[in-house]
Image: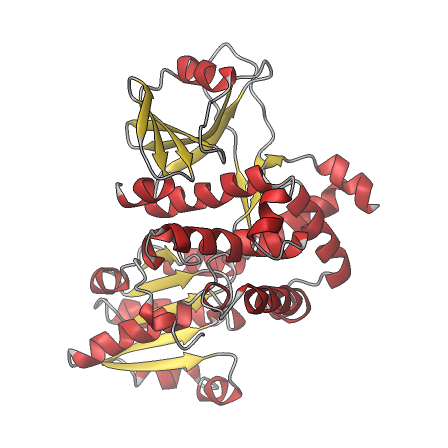
Amino acid sequence: MHQYAVMILRKLDIATALSRFPVVALLGARQVGKTTLAKQAAATLEAAGRATLYLDLERPSDLARLQDAELFLQAQTDKLVVIDEVQRRPDLFPLLRALVDADRGPGRFLILGSAAPELLRQSSESLAGRITYLELGPFTLDEVGATPENQRRLWLRGGFPDSFLATDDDASLAWREAFIRTYLERDLPQLGFRLAATELRRFWQMLAHHHGQLWNGSQLAGSLGVNHTTVRRWLDVLEATYMARVLPPLHANLKKRLTKSPKVYLRDSGLLHALLGIRGQGDLFAHPVAGASWEGFALEQILAARPGGNATFYRTTVGAEIDLVLEQGARRQAWEFKLGLAPKPARGFWQGLEDLEIAEATIVYPGDAAYPLKESVWVRPLAECVSAN
């Protein structure tokens, strides 16, 4: 973690979760800041008089301490035990359940993991009713400070701490290129995924060129010389390790022919740009993916600012389309993302609002002033959208 990362205040509230649940799972991509945040939470508890213990399961010395895990952890009942990279020891989950059942006090264990499926499957089976899940993503605009310069930097470099906080754009790009290599060659095998790094990189790069588009597995498979089942498995791996977002289509009870394929985005704009060879802001604006890059970047910011909602997109076969439909309880909002400074939604956007009877809609753009297009439909800067939630 970058030495200045602690200057960025993360918005995720671990303390409240630890005060309510015996086990808290903090999930997210590698190098996103989980360890730093967990250690900060532990330090806060220690300052309040609660003892803590940190175990990193990538360190042989910490793994050795768990040789007899039951005996060791039984002796830590007075402490918050932080277990980093817990998916390396899935056999711990039944033991954690037994220890929690013996003492249901809150804040017993804080477990950190870099991949969703195995961790979620094991913990869901073993710790149901005893655990809550928190997801830590890359830095958000609200966290780094919603200034125009920070927005440009965050969009170009992405939100991984060491990338965003690098001394210059070249250093940031070098970090992201190294991250991609390490992810493919070391991280995935350690997480249990046996995939050819060269093939997965080609797929990842091809996905970058199709960022924000409808998933067409057959087309991608044909281009790569594999079958559609293989490319879908690769996509599942990228999604499971927080590299890709698969946005499902809205299934509405309408007399409309709706798109059934999901849209696929790379979740971090900085990794997207590294895979496409985009080095600086000028390269970005000149690249054909610029509009889709802005869409994915802004979409991630909106979802991070409004967690817990049901996120879909709307598209019919006759051209009605809304980039993001966000449902939170009975509230349904439409979001459209436009890169230009004078955004004008296409006819399909207005048709989508009419189809879904949505009264509240926002067009998110990179400008600095909010103004109405019509009643309840506003054009707003991204910075305003992430701070006014």
Horizontal side, residue 103 vs residue 231: left or right: left
Residue 176 placement: quadrant: bottom right
Q: Position of residue 364 (x, y in %)?
A: 40, 34
Residue that appears at 50% across and 38% down: 295
Q: Quadrant of the N terminus?
A: bottom left
Residue that appears at 59% across and 13% down: 318
Give the answer, above or below, for where 148 lies relative to 126: above
Q: Nearer the viewer, residue 147 or 336?
A: 147
Q: Position of residue 64 (x, y in %)?
A: 49, 88
Residue at the outermost left position: 48
Q: Position of residue 334 (x, y in %)?
A: 39, 27
Give the answer, above or below, for where 317 lies relative to 277: above
Q: Nearer the viewer, residue 8 or 110?
A: 8
Q: Position of residue 319 (x, y in %)?
A: 57, 16
Q: Quadrant of the C terminus?
A: top left
Residue that appears at 74% across and 47% down: 230
